[in-house]
Amino acid sequence: MFNTQIPLQRDGGGEIDLSEVVGTLKDHKWRIVIIIAVFVAIAVAYSILATPIYQASAMVQVEQKVPDLPGLSALTQTLSAENPVAMTESDLITSRMVIGAAVNKLNLTIESSPDRFPVIGNLIARHYAARNPGKVSSAPWGLAGYDWGGSKLDIFQLDVPDSLLDKPLQLTAGEGGIYVLQDSDHNVLVIGRAGQSSTGHGITMQVKTLDANPGTRFKVFRHRDLTVINSLQKKIDVKEQGKDSGILRMTYNNADPKVAADVLEQVGELYVRQDVDRNSAEATNSLKFVREQLPNVRMELEKATEALNAFQNKAHSVDVNLQTQALLNQNVSIQTNLEQLRLQQADIQRQFTPEHPQYRALMKQIGELESKKASIDKQIGTLPDTQKTLLKLNSDVQVSNQTYQNLLNQAQQLDIARAGTVGNVRIVDNAAVDVTDPAWPKTLIVVLAGAVLGGVVSMLYVFVRQILNRGIEDPSIIENLGLPVYATIPISTREIALEGRRGRGDTRQHLLVTDAPADLAAEALRSLRTSLHFARMEAKNNVLMITGASPDTGKTFVSANLAAVVAQSGQKVLLIDGDLRMGTLHSVVGGRADIGLSELISGQAELKDAIRPVAPLSNNLFFIGRGRIPPNPSELLMNVRFSALLDQLKPMYDLIIIDTPPILAVTDAAIIGNHSGTGLLVARFGVNQPRELDLAKQRFEQNGVVIKGAIFNAVEKRSTGYYSYAYYAVDAAAS
C-alpha cells in the first residue's frame, strides 16, 4: 500500500491526506469552474483584442572561412577552416556596427503611434484598415481625438534637445496637413505643415506624410540612438540551424509586418556588406605588406649574386660536385620555405596573438623546417672549405631569387583577390513575413494558458481560503471543548431564499418549518426538539436561552424555527427577542418590533399589548419582540422588573425561548443566562473557530451560567469529513 498522506499539519497536529485535498477541491468545484471560466473568457478577449505581432525571418549561410590569400601553407589553411565561426558571425549580426547602421537607415529612433480608444480601439482600427486600404475612418460619436483606422504619420526628421529625448510628445493633426507638437505639459513646441521643415524651442522637425482627421492625436518619441540599438539587439534572434552547419536563421517580431521585414532585410544586407569589406581590407593589408618586403628581398638577392660572382672569379670558376649539388638543392628548398613562413609570421602577427591556434600552427611548421635545416647544416659542415663556401653562396642566391619570385606572384594574386572579394557570407532566404499567421497571440495557446492559470489561481484561492478560514467543519471539535452537540442543522437553500426576502424588507412570516416542512434543516430541528425534551428534565425552569459566540451564526433562525416545531408538537411556547440592540426576530415570525421587551421592562406597556400569536400556530406559539432600541440595554436587563416578568411568564407557557445577542460582543446573554434553566450555544459551520467557542464558554462560566451544549448550524455537505447521519433517514422517508 502506498502512503498518500501529505506532510502538512493542521492546528490540531493531524496530517492532511490526499483524499482530503481532493475532497476540498470537489467541495469547491463550482467556485473553481467559475474562476477558470473567467480566466478563459479573459484569455479569449485578449486573443481578440490584442494587437497581432508578426515575425519576419531570414536565413544566411556562413561558409567556413578558408583563407584564399596566397602564400598560406596547407596546414595553416586547414586549421583555420576547422575553426567554427557560426558563433562569431551570429554576434557580428547583432553588433552595434550592423544594428546601428540599420537603425540610422530606417530612422528607427523616431517612434510615432496614433491614440486609439481604450481596449477596443486597436481592434476597430485594424478591421477598418483591412477592409478599406488607403482610407481614413471618420470619427464616430464625436471622438475626433482618436484614430479609428487608416491614420498615418511619417516623420522624416526630428531633432530635439537632450531634455526631451525618450520623453512622450503629442502631435495633433489639423486641416491641410498642419500639425501642432506639444510636450507632456501641453506646451506648444512646434507648429508646422507636412512636407516642410519646421523649428521651434530647439526642435527641428520635418513630417513627410500626415494623413489623419483633424484633431487626431499621435504619440511621438525621439529616442536615443543607443537605446534603440540595445533594444533591437535583444529583439533580433539569431540561431544556428544544426550544429556547425553554418546556416543562421534570423527572426524579428514587430506589430507592423512591413517594419519587421525592413529591419531584418537591412540587417542582413549590412551584415553581408561588412563581411565583404572586412575580407577586402584583409587582402589590402596583405598586399601592402608584400609590397613593403619586395625592395628588401631584391636588395638581398643582388648582394648574394655579387658575393657569388666575386668568389667564383677569385676561385677561378670552381664548380660544385654532385654530392654538393644534392645538398644545395635540399638546403635551398628548406630555406625558401622558411623565408616564406617567416614572412607569413610577420603578417599574421598583425592579426592574431601568439596563443591563437593559427599562429601556433605556423610556429610549429617553422620549427620542423628549422630542425631539417640543422640536419643539412651538419652534412654541409663535413665538406671542404671551398665547396662549403660555394654551396652557401649558391644557396643564398637561389633562396633570395625564389623568395623574390614568390613575393611578386603573391602581389599579383593579392591585387586580384582585393578587387574580386565576395566574402564568406551569403543570404539564402530574404526577409519575409507571413501576414496570415501572426506570431502572437496564438488563440489556442492563450486560451489553454488562461485555463491553466485559472485552475492554479482557483486552487490557490480555495486552499488559502481554507487555511485562513479555520472555521469548524466537524462537530467532534466542538465536543472536544466540552460542549455536547445537540443537533447538526444542514444548510438550506430554501432558508437562504427566505433570508433574501427579509433583506428586501418583506415583513411577512419567513419560518422554514412552516414554509418547507420537508426540508432537511426542518427535520434536523425536530431532532433538536427531541434532544431538548430530555435535556430540560434537570433544568431549574422552562426558560431556554439560544445564544452565539459571534454574529451571523444563525441563532435567530434556530430560535424561531425551534419554537415553531415545539409548538407543532402541541406545547405552548413563548418566543422572546432578547437582543435589545439589533434583534431581528420579528422579521422571521412576521410583523414589526414596535412594542416589546424593552417597553415591558421599562413599564411603558402591558403584557397583553406586547404578546401576540404567531400564525399559523396561533394557538400554541406566541411572540414578544425586542421593542424600541433602548439607550441602556444591559442596565435594562439587570432591572428587577425583567426577573419579575419572567416569573410571571413561566407558569403561562410550557417553554420560553429567548434569543440573545452574541456573548463575545456584549454581556446581555450572560445576564439573561442567569434567569434561564437551559442554555444552548449556536456554532456555524466554517465560520466559528474553536477558540471562539471556548472563549464564549469561559465567559458564561465566569458569570455563573452553564451552557448545556451546542447546535451546529448551516452544515455543508463535504466530500470528506462529517456527514449528518440524520440525512439518510430523511431521504429514505422522502423516497
Image: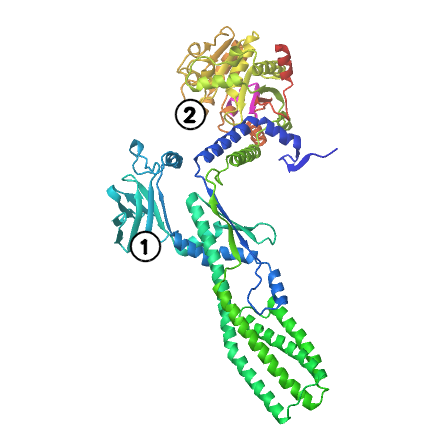
Mark 1 vs mark 2: give the one in front: 1
Residue 331 placed where, x, y %?
66, 79
Q: Depth check: give the residue in front, 31 or 389.
A: 389
Instruction: Say the numbered circle drawn on residue 393.
Output: none
Q: Residues within 10 Å of mark 1 (few under 14, many from 20)?
A: some
Reply above or below: 58 against 23.
below
Residue 285 placed where, x, y %?
49, 70
Where on the picture, by quarter, is residue 391?
A: bottom right
Q: Which residue is mark 1?
A: 160
Q: Depth check: give the residue in front, 587 or 450.
A: 450
Looking at this view, name the residue that lies furthest to the top.
619
Q: Amino acid at mark 2?
A: Asn
Instruction: Say the numbered circle drawn on residue 632.
Output: 2
Q: How is the image coloured?
A: rainbow
Horizontal relation, residue 485 to residue 290: left or right: right
Can residue 464 be seen here? no
Q: Depth check: give the residue in front, 566 or 411.
A: 411
**Residue ID at (63%, 15%):** 534
The quarter of the picture where the N terminus appears is top right
Q: Which residues are magenta?
A: 670-685
Give the mark nearest the N terminus, 1 or 2: 1
Secondary structure type for disc 2: loop
